[in-house]
Structures are given as C-alpha cells and as structure tokens.
Amino acid sequence: MRLSHSKTVIAAKIFIALLSVSFVSGCGKSQTATIPPPVVKVIEVKAQSVPITLEFVGQVEALDEVQVRARVSGQIVKRFVPGGQYVKQGQALFQIDPQVYEMNVLDASAQLADSEAALSRVRQNLARLERLVMADAISRQQYDNALAEEKQLLARVNSAKARLRRAELDLKDTIVVAPIEGQMDTTNLSVGNYVQQGVTVLVTIAAPDPVLVRFSLSENEYLRLVKSESTASSQADSHSLQIALEDGSVYPFKGKVVQSDRGLASGTGTLTLKAQFPNPKGLLLPGMFARVQAIAETRSDAILVPQRAVQDLMGKSMITVVGEGEKAEMRAVTTGPRIGRLWLVEEGLNRGERIVVDGVQKVRPGEIVKAETVPIEQYTNTKAK
C-alpha cells in the first residue's frame, strides 16, 4: 500500500516536470517568432512643371473713401439714411437745423434790395446831372461826385449779391448729401447731435468697386518679380496677381499693381505696393486681410512632396525614403517655397524614388518596411500635372 502511494507521487512529479518543459518550450517559440515589418504609405516622386508663387500679406483698402463733414454748424434735425446703407452720389443723408440760415437768406435779400434801390436813385440823379452839366447849369465837380457815388453803390450791390449767394449756399448745405456712391459706415451721428462746420465727421463712405490691396515685399522679392516680368513676352504677368482669402478660397478676380512707393522703407527695407482688384459683388471689404500671390517663375521638372513627409530635425529637413530591399533611409533634403500643401524639394530627391508620407513614426533607419503606394492627391488639394 505504501509502495503504491510512492509510485503515484513519483508519477505526478514526472507529469508536472513534463508540463514545465512543454511550457518553457512553447515560450521560447513565441519569443523567437518573426515580427512583421511596419506598414507605411509611400508616394512615388514625380517631376512636373509648376509655377513658383510668391505670397505677401496684404490688407484691403477702398479706392475711394470720403469722410463726410458738415459745411455748416448746427444741430442735426433729420437723418434720411440709416448707417451701413449703400447710397448714390448726391443722395440726402442728414439735415441740419435750417432756421438760422433761412433768416440769413432773408436778411441778405433785404440788404440787396436796399442797395439796389439806392443805386437806382443815384442813377436817376446821375442822368439828370448829366443833362445839367452839358448845359453848364452845374459844375463838373457835382457830376463827378454823383458818378463816384454810383460806383460805390454798385460795389455795395455786388457785395450784397455775394452775401445772398453765400447765405443761399449755407441754407442748401443744411442738407448733407453723399459726395460719392458707396457704402456708409455704421458710426453715423443721430438726430440731436450738434455738428461743427468742417470738423465733425458725420459718416464715412467707401466705394466698393474696385478696391486696393496694400502689401509689402522685400528687396530680393522685388528683384525677382522685376526679372520675371522682364523675361515675359508682355506685361501680362503684372496683371495676374491673385488673392487667397482667410478661409482658404481663391478670389475669382485677378488684379494688377497700380501704385508703388518711391523707395524702400528705411526702417524695414521693404517696398510698399498697392494692387487694384475688381470687386463687383462687394466681397472684399476695407480692413480685410488677404494673401496676395504673384507668379515669380515657372519651374520645369519640379519635385513636390506633401508637407507631412518632411520632418524638421536639428534644423534640417529630413525625408524617409524606401530604398533597395524595402529598407527605410533618412535623407536630408533642401526645400524651396511652399506650393499649396506641398513643398518644392530643390535637392536630395530624384524622380522615381519612394518617400514615406504616413507611418514615419513607426520606422527606424535601416529597417525593412511594407510599403503601400498611394497617390499624392490623397495628401494635398494640388493635383500633379
């Protein structure tokens, strides 16, 4: 009985040992199993002809903008148009209290009538004296004195006419009209405000079409643009400026440079230009920021890569290339200007090579990868030509 128990214990120990050996053997196999290579997405580098565009930050300005000021002083008694409205040239905007100016017209009219009556009396007397002096009934001195009085009264009449004309103009100016066609701002004065002649700004009106876009460029950029225009067949390039709006859309109308500063700014070394753009729908508003784009040159056989494929490491632009044997290689490249969502690569890449655009973080230099080729359009809105 004791011998049978001992055999059972020995058999159990052997079974446990075999299980341990099997478990260890199994673990060893799992540890030595092959790890699959990381999957990355790549694009094949292609050369294409692309325009090289310079971009400048600009601000929209009105081509014609007028601050409307009162020509006469007084209290606003009526407002014809609310702020923010589009108005025609000559349209009534405000009325200033006309009572004082109406009285000035009446007073000037009375003075003119009095002066004209005095002149009429003197002329009648002068005609009588002229006959008497011809008959030697009076002295020549009396006639000359009457003639001088006529000239004096004539001057007084002309002065009275001028005062009446001025009073009539002042009365007319109590109705403030729009000097140009355009849109009013919303900061106009309300009824009851007192305005001072030539000082108080009643409203600002800006013509919506066309508009100007002011921007500045460096000396190198200026020279680049001048050289590109000199090599063009005509000056059409200077008429092909376009605007990229803040929402990323491209303004549908092209513009041209119409004003240029006389020289570079002493503080910044930049040249200020103004480009004129059509604005028939009023989309561009004064004060808006816009990116002015100008074509500096057209580069043939240009290599473009998505921005996400380029990494900045220690101040260098690096791209992961999948080379022979499907091995990953980190390569330094020289990038040029940005074109949409692409970088122009000046040096470091050749057509036909494959670069990693997705999964770069999973790859180490020299590691074998599983590359899946995808089109470049998947990572940018700019399509290859």
Image (cartoon, helix red, strand yellow):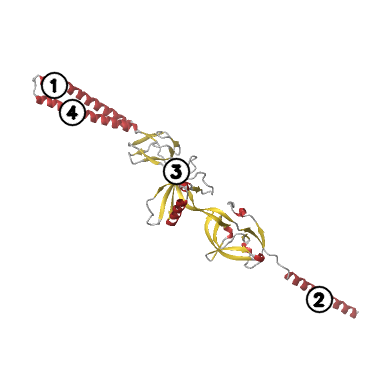
Mark 3, residue position: 211
Tag 1 near tag 4, CB within 8 Å: no
Q: Which mark is residue 17?
A: 2
Q: Which mark is residue 9?
A: none
| SS class, disc 1 | helix
Q: Earlier in the sequence, mark 2 or mark 4?
A: 2
Say if residue 340 shows up in the picture.
no
User: Going by the image, does 185 lie left or right of 347?
Assistant: left
- Of tags 4 and 3, the one toward the viewer is 3
Q: Earlier in the sequence, mark 1 or mark 4?
A: 1
Residue 5 image point, x, y percent: 88, 78
| SS class, disc 3 | strand
Count neighbours of disc 4 (C-alpha within 10 A) and say few if under 14, some if 14 to 19, many if 20 or more. Answer: some
Mark 1, residue position: 130
Mark 4, residue position: 151
Is 305 located above or below residue 170 in the figure? below
